[in-house]
Image (tube, rainbow, N blue to C red):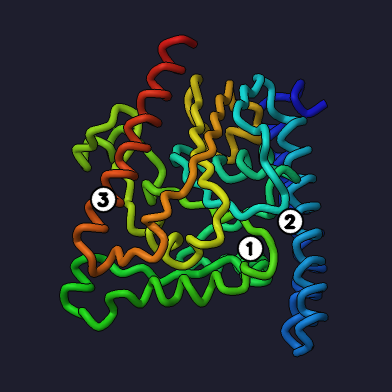
């Protein structure tokens, strides 16, 4: 088996297997997406959307099988009880490694609806994957910095409108939306540069989550607060495929979405914005304490 091979060989075989699996499933994915684009009938498009999801989940299943072959150390996962395939979820998670997403795809496979996440507009240019994400209705977003909005106030609120349009299609079938609130992978250097008040986390950016709540808040059955911890340290994709990923601890907590947040105006209501930020910061403080506890008891 690959796990008994030297790391360079294991990693190379894993990369090849992952690439071939991506090509294998992306080609039919794009073919069905093209048919969906050309056929205007709503009923036919709904069936093709369901087929696209099946193809994507098979893609994930094989990726997860590759991970099981090359990964040695055990995973400790809690909180997967009572999840439903017919529900709508907003997933908020800390972001530490390149492999966070495949790990989340593996643990949630066929436990919740197919998971999508917001992507920067530029990522649509990524070979194969950009087209696959487009075919699967991943929302592509154009984010504006505070400095840009100060110079172009007419753009304020555009991201929320775009999010609403992108998410409108998700009303037809259960969906899970993933949001990494930190906006980038955590490192000690980034945490220090931010002067983050947390020991293990970057400052959360509440705006992205607020946009998702504004667009789909009345649809979400629950928030899935996910904490991923790497007691032996995080790895990149090569580290995963070459068998260098150590133990993984994942904690999932279902949280209700406060009714007061539905319909709130994060961009223009300073009271709502302050309350929403305080709520997110409380979640992040609890997450930081959980990580400390796990690392201290390992």
From this viewpoint, is residue 109 visible? yes
- Numbered disc 2: secondary structure: helix
Q: Earlier in the sequence, mark 1 or mark 3?
A: 1
- Numbered disc 3: secondary structure: helix
- Please tell me how many numbered marks the rendered image carries: 3
In the image, 152: left or right of 253?
A: left
Q: Earlier in the sequence, mark 2 or mark 3?
A: 2
Measured as percent of width and height from the top left, residue 46 is found at 77, 74
Instruction: Report the residue at 30% width, 69% height from top.
Output: 144
Marks 2 and 1 in Cβ contact (< 8 Å): yes
Instruction: Report the residue at 68% width, 71% height from top.
Output: 135
Judge whether 19 appears above or below 249 on screen.
below
Instruction: Report the residue at 22% width, 73% height from top.
Output: 149
Instruction: Report the residue at 80% width, 73% height from top.
Output: 48
Q: Mark 1 points at which residue?
A: 129
Q: Name the residue under label 2.
A: 22
Front-lying residue, 259 or 272? 259
Measured as percent of width and height from the top left, residue 246 is found at 58, 22
In the image, 59: left or right of 189?
A: right
- Numbered disc 1: secondary structure: helix
Q: Name the residue under label 3.
A: 275
Measured as percent of width and height from the top left, residue 286 is found at 37, 30
Spatial CA distance of label 2 from label 1 is: 8 Å
Q: How crowded is mark 1: few (under 14 residues within 10 Å), some or many (20 or more)?
A: some
Q: How crowded is mark 3: few (under 14 residues within 10 Å), some or many (20 or more)?
A: few
Spatial CA distance of label 1 from label 3 is: 37 Å
């Amino acid at each position: 088996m690959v796990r008994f091979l030297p790391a360079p060989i294991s990693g190379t075989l894993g990369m090849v297997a992952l690439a071939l699996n991506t090509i294998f499933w992306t080609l039919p994915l794009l073919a069905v997406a093209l048919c969906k684009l050309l056929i205007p009938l709503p009923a036919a498009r709904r069936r093709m959307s369901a087929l696209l999801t099946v193809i994507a989940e098979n893609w994930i299943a094989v990726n997860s099988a590759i991970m099981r072959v090359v990964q040695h150390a055990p995973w400790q996962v809690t909180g997967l009880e009572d999840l439903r395939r017919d529900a709508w979820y907003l997933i908020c998670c800390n972001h530490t490694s390149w492999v966070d997403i495949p790990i989340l795809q593996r643990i949630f496979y066929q436990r919740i609806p197919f998971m999508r996440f917001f992507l920067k507009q530029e990522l649509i240019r990524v070979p194969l994957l950009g087209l696959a994400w487009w075919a699967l209705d991943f929302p592509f977003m154009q984010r504006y910095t505070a400095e840009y909005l100060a110079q172009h106030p007419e753009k304020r609120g555009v991201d929320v409108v775009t999010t609403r349009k992108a998410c409108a299609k998700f009303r037809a079938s259960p969906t899970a939306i993933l949001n990494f609130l930190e906006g980038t992978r955590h490192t000690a250097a980034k945490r220090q540069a931010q002067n983050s008040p947390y020991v293990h986390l970057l400052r959360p950016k509440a705006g992205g989550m607020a946009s998702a709540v504004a667009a789909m808040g009345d649809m979400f059955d629950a928030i899935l607060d996910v904490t991923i911890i790497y007691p032996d340290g995080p790895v990149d994709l090569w580290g995963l495929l070459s068998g260098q990923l150590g133990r993984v601890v994942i904690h999932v907590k279902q949280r209700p979405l406060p009714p007061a947040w539905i319909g709130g105006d994060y961009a223009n209501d300073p009271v709502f914005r302050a309350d929403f930020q305080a709520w997110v910061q409380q979640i992040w403080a609890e997450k930081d304490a959980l990580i400390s506890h796990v690392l201290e008891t390992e």
